[in-house]
Amino acid sequence: MPEVILPGASGRIEGRYSPGKRPNAPIALILHPHPKAGGHMNNPVAVTLYQLFVKRGFATLRYNSRGVGKSQGEFDSGIGELADAATALDWLQANNPAATQTWVAGYQFGAYIGMQLLMRRPETDGFISVSPPSNMYDFSFLAPCPASGLFLHGTADSIVPPIEVERVVNKLRTQKGIVIDYELEEGASHFWQDHMPAVERRVGAYLDKRLEEKPA
């Protein structure tokens, strides 16, 4: 898991990268929670997502967005953070030009940025969105959503009530050509304390299902 430094619009971007197990390995980008709420690439949910992809042979990158850790710059209300995500995906693709699939996974604010990135990168094959803050940000940009994916949420999330996520899911499910999975973990909060095994189990099972349908 070597440290990597990427050149970003606001200076260096600090990341952790695990190369794929073969030259044409699929790639995955992991996005962390809100920087102003202490979010960083070593957040337990972000690390779990990272490890799930690494375990399945993906070339996987997680990174600190601007102003976090060793990454330069300042928080930019999502605009600069989206630019950082695009830079990170560019780097992943440049280092893995033969990648068979492209995935984006994010937690909380990272899920919001990840879904925006998805809209700009139609080559994306799948996404994972854990606890997307759909009551704090407008997700109406997902029209149409270019890829199938998984929304994972906790029933005890008091910061983003499940009904707010269900509205987004129900809207996306009216689209043809994609399949949206929505899973609720009983008793899990927004921060997934004591429920990390559920993240690993549910996301892992979803990835295995998708990779069985379309091997990477």
Image (cartoon, helix red, strand yellow):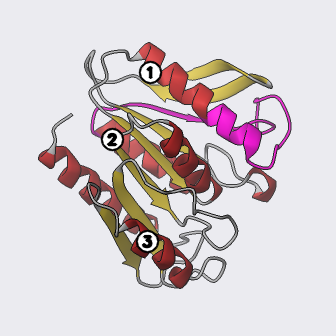
* Residue 65, position as x, y percentages in the image: 70, 38
Kind of residue at badge 3: Lys
Is residue 64 visible in the rendered image? The answer is no
Q: Nearer the viewer, mark 1 or mark 3?
A: 3
Q: Residue at x 80, y 49 (%)?
A: 77
Q: Residue at x 57, y 56 (%)?
A: 141
Q: Residues within 10 Å of mark 1 (few under 14, many from 20)?
A: some
Q: Nearer the viewer, residue 5 or 170?
A: 170
Is 82 included in the stretch rendered in magenta? yes
* Residue 139, position as x, y percentages in the image: 58, 62
Q: Residues within 10 Å of mark 3 (few under 14, many from 20)?
A: few
Q: What is the quadrant of the C terminus in the image?
A: top left
* Residue 67, position as x, y percentages in the image: 81, 37
Please name the residue that numbered disc 3 is placed on: 171
Kind of residue at badge 1: Gln
Q: Residue at x 70, y 52 (%)?
A: 39
Please name the residue that numbered disc 1 is placed on: 93
Q: Nearer the viewer, residue 139 or 77?
A: 139
CA gap between label 2 and label 3 equals 20 Å
Q: Secondary structure at mark 2?
A: loop
Please name the residue that numbered disc 2 is placed on: 125
Q: Hey, which quadrant is residue 98 in on the image?
A: top left
Point out the stretch of residues depicted in magenta.
56-85
Kind of residue at badge 2: Asp
The answer to whether mark 1 and mark 3 are in CB contact below 8 A is no
Q: Is residue 85 left or right of residue 127?
A: right
CA gap between label 1 and label 2 equals 13 Å
Is 3 included in the stretch rendered in magenta? no
* Upstream in sequence: badge 1 or badge 3: 1
* Upstream in sequence: badge 2 or badge 3: 2
Q: Secondary structure at mark 1?
A: helix
Q: Nearer the viewer, residue 183 or 175?
A: 175
